[in-house]
Amino acid sequence: MLDYGDITGETTDAIVNAANERLAGGAGVDGAIHRAGGPTIMAQCRKIGGCPTGEAVITTGGKLKAKYVIHTVGPIYRDGTKGEAKLLQSAYKKSLELAREKGLQSISFPAISTGIYGYPLDEAAHLALNTCIEFVRGNTDIKLIRHILFSSKIYDIYSTQLKMLV
Ligand code: AR6
């Protein structure tokens, strides 16, 4: 399901953070989640220590409405020949697997890698939606996957890509 807005207000069991490998916090959606969720999220990130690109880890949601934050690291986009697509798919898949392992039923994603990491929006939207659709075909445990898009431009790109997939 697509929606427009700020992911920090989501009431799904988990929200996903577009983090960096050091889990050090940053700008964009990462900064917004840590600001809204408070310091317990960063304290747990420090304990975990890091997360390789394409992997995912989980912490509390702190003061957020969502119980958990799943931190994943999308690829930095270079020229598309450095394994970026596989890594972006993996970031979505590992986040979903972690949610399933925890018994969660709903999850919200931002458009991972499409901000500071520079991933072209059309391709990132296609990969995000396709990976989620394939995952729910094989697993029925997760009942709701929301994609929270931060601008009308990104929302429109997701809508176009979704129409092509279903
Ligand atoms: N809610 C939903 N989406 C958001 C929000 C928000 N509050 N804020 C930004 N976006 P980015 P990346 C969108 O740059 O490209 C950080 O510094 C934004 O419009 O947050 O994966 C990390 O620490 C864009 O479409 O993440 C890493 O160092 C999308 O979220 C690095 O940036 C992702 O943009 C990760 O870069």
Image: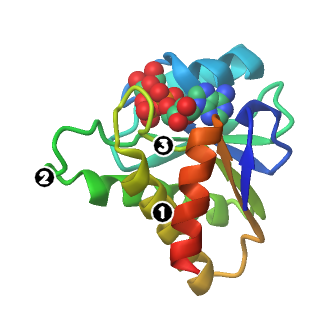
Q: Of the residues shown, which amino acid type is indicated by label 3?
A: Ile
Q: Of the residues shown, which amino acid type is indicated by label 1?
A: Lys
| Gap between marks 3 and 1 measured at Cα | 12 Å
Please give the name of the residue rendered at 69% of the width and 43% of the height, measured from the top-left corner.
Answer: 15
> Which of pointers 3 and 1 lies earlier in the amino acid sequence?
1
Marks 3 and 1 in Cβ contact (< 8 Å): no
Quarter of the figure that contains the N terminus: bottom right
Is label 2 or label 1 in front?
A: 2
Name the quadrant containing residue 7: top right
* Residue at image mark 2: 81
What element does badge 3 sit on? loop
- Circle 1 crowding by C-alpha within 10 Å: few under 14, some 14–19, many from 20: many
Ligand 1 within 8 Å of disc 3? The answer is: yes
Q: Of the residues shown, which amino acid type is indicated by label 2?
A: Thr
What element does badge 2 sit on? loop
| Gap between marks 2 and 1 measured at Cα | 20 Å
* Residue at image mark 3: 112
> Which of pointers 2 and 3 lies earlier in the amino acid sequence?
2
Is label 3 or label 1 in front?
A: 3
* Residue at image mark 1: 93
Taking the image as drawn, is residue 18 in sight?
Answer: no
> Which of pointers 2 and 1 lies earlier in the amino acid sequence?
2
Q: Nearer the viewer, residue 148 or 32?
A: 148
